[in-house]
Amino acid sequence: MAFCAYCGTEVQDARYLCLNCGNPVSGAPRAAVPAPTSKAPIIIILLVVAIPLVIAFLGIIAAIAIPNFVTAVQRSKQKRTQADIRSISTATEAYAVDHKVYPRATGMSSLAPELEPTYIKHVPLVDGWGHPFRYECWSKEGGDDCDAYAFGSSARDGRWEHDALRDYEGDHSTTNFDCDIIFMNGTFVEYPEGISRF
């Protein structure tokens, strides 16, 4: 029979802990109990290091994403404007097939009744930026009948680069969102780069 070296209680096996006091029966030193540690300093260190890193990461993401988002919004307004101009010009060409001349109108408000609803259900009056479209027709020979036409959008800035749409010449693509978008006699003569001019 064995006895606990700490409390003197009789035990069956000297290799285990005493059921009475919980100490080693053999009298071996008690196991050291680690002192409780505080996790507060670790949390503070993590917060001091992590918060600035998270803020810096979000700043980098914002610096990349916001300009790309703004560019995408402007490009979508350009595409919508070009699509609307194509729709109006298709209706104008259909009108010319039936009447042998382009509609003689002084602007979009007087053009709309000529085209609606026979050639187009609804004539868009404003571009993607909310600025009014412009329509002009003229005679190449100086007569009364219109045998040439142009549609235009003043684009993002809302300012026209020329007084008359017929003053725009050539094939001019641009990456500037402020440059006018001009469609003349079946083709774009001033248009956003990377977008079809026909």
Image (cartoon, rainbow, N blue to C red):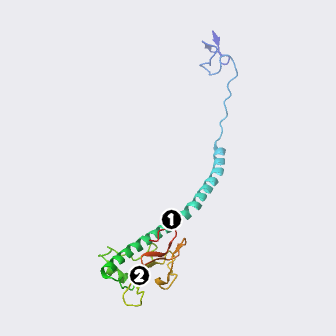
Residue farthest top in this picture: 1
Residue at screen point 61% across, 56% down: 55
Residue 102, image x and y in percent?
Answer: 36, 82
Q: Is residue 115 above or below residue 39?
A: below
Please tell me which of labels 1 and 2 falls first in the chain: 1
Q: Which labelled disc corresponds to residue 90? A: none
Q: Observer-nearest residue: 22 or 180? A: 180
Residue 87, image x and y in percent?
Answer: 38, 72
Reading the image, the residue beneath label 2 is: 149
Q: Which labelled disc corresponds to residue 72? A: 1
Q: Amino acid at mark 2?
A: Tyr
The quarter of the picture where residue 65 lies is bottom right
- Mark 1 Cα-neighbour bin, 10 Å: few <14, some 14–19, many ≥20: few
- Mark 2 Cα-neighbour bin, 10 Å: few <14, some 14–19, many ≥20: many
Label 1 SS: helix
Q: Amino acid at mark 1?
A: Ala
Query: How many numbered marks are there?
Result: 2
Residue at screen point 36% across, 77% down: 93
Q: Observer-nearest residue: 5 or 149? A: 149
Q: Is residue 107 above or below residue 52?
A: below
Q: CA distance from mark 1 to mark 2?
A: 31 Å
Residue at screen point 30% across, 79% down: 98
Nearer the camera: disc 1 or disc 2: 2
Label 2 SS: strand
Residue farthest front in this picture: 141
